[in-house]
Image (cartoon, rainbow, N blue to C red):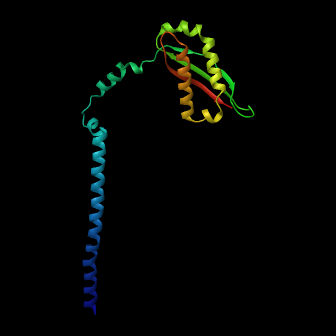
Amino acid sequence: MAEEEKEAVKEQEEESPDKKSPMKLIILAVVLVLLLGGGAFAWKSGMLNSVLGGEDKDKTAKTVKEDPKHDIGPVYALAPFIVNLNEPLGKRYLKVKVEIELDNGKMQSEMEKRLPQFRDGILTLLSSKSYKDISDLSGKYELRAEILGMVNGYLKTGKVRNVYFTEFIVQ
């Protein structure tokens, strides 16, 4: 009987490696696939190239500095705007401070001449908006684009590059 028990234990030990070996193969295959996928992603995204020294960091930094898009032009600050939003009961109001990036410094005099036109157009535009229109990020971007188009429509020399909100309060 003792011999039978020993044989049974030996059979179980012999069977267990067979059961574990497919599991080991599956785990090994998953790890291999993950490593290959990660390597392919790193190669595709260029991370591997920069880690291995394929790109010169100083060269890319100089390229960004020389890019004219990153240079900011003269900025013309407008006085803050406070308007009632287009709401049924008129309980919400908006306070916005707008700064306008100009194409060149020569536009300052035209900006000052046309300031009443700009303020009137921006006040009219802001008061036509509801809270729902400007409450999310896309609404703010749309408002910025509308102000940019309106101001550029009044200008005769040069153009406005960008509009910045330095204060944006809705209550």
Outermost right residue? 89
Measured as percent of width and height from the top left, residue 45 is found at 31, 39
Q: Looking at the image, is 119 positioned above or below residue 58?
A: above
Which residue is nearer to you in this view: 100 or 65?
Answer: 100
Which quarter of the figure is the N terminus placed in?
bottom left
Q: Is residue 31 above or below residue 19?
A: above
Residue at the extreme bottom of the image, as rendered: 1
Q: In the drawing, does residue 45 fall left or right of residue 135?
A: left
Q: Quadrant of residue 62?
A: top left
Q: Residue at x 29, y 73 (%)?
A: 19
Instruction: Report x, y in % for residue 86.
Output: 69, 30
Percent from the top left, x then y, of residue 95?
65, 25
Position above or below: 10 against 75: below
Q: Nearer the viewer, residue 132 or 18?
A: 132
Q: Nearer the viewer, residue 157 or 60?
A: 157
Q: Position of residue 93 (x, y in %)?
A: 69, 29
Please tell me whether residue 31 is drawn above or below residue 7 in the rendered image: above
Q: Does residue 83 appear anywhere in the picture?
A: yes
* 70 displayed left or right of 75: left
Q: Which residue is rendered at x = 26% and y = 69% of the image?
A: 21
Q: Nearer the viewer, residue 116 or 171?
A: 116
- Quarter holding the C terminus is top right
What residue lies at 28% left-to-right and 55% top-to-bottom? 33
- Regarding residue 79, the answer to whether it shows in the image is no
Q: Which corner quadrant of the image does residue 26 belong to?
A: bottom left
| Residue depicted at 58% across the width and 8% down the height | 112
Q: Is residue 43 left or right of residue 108?
A: left
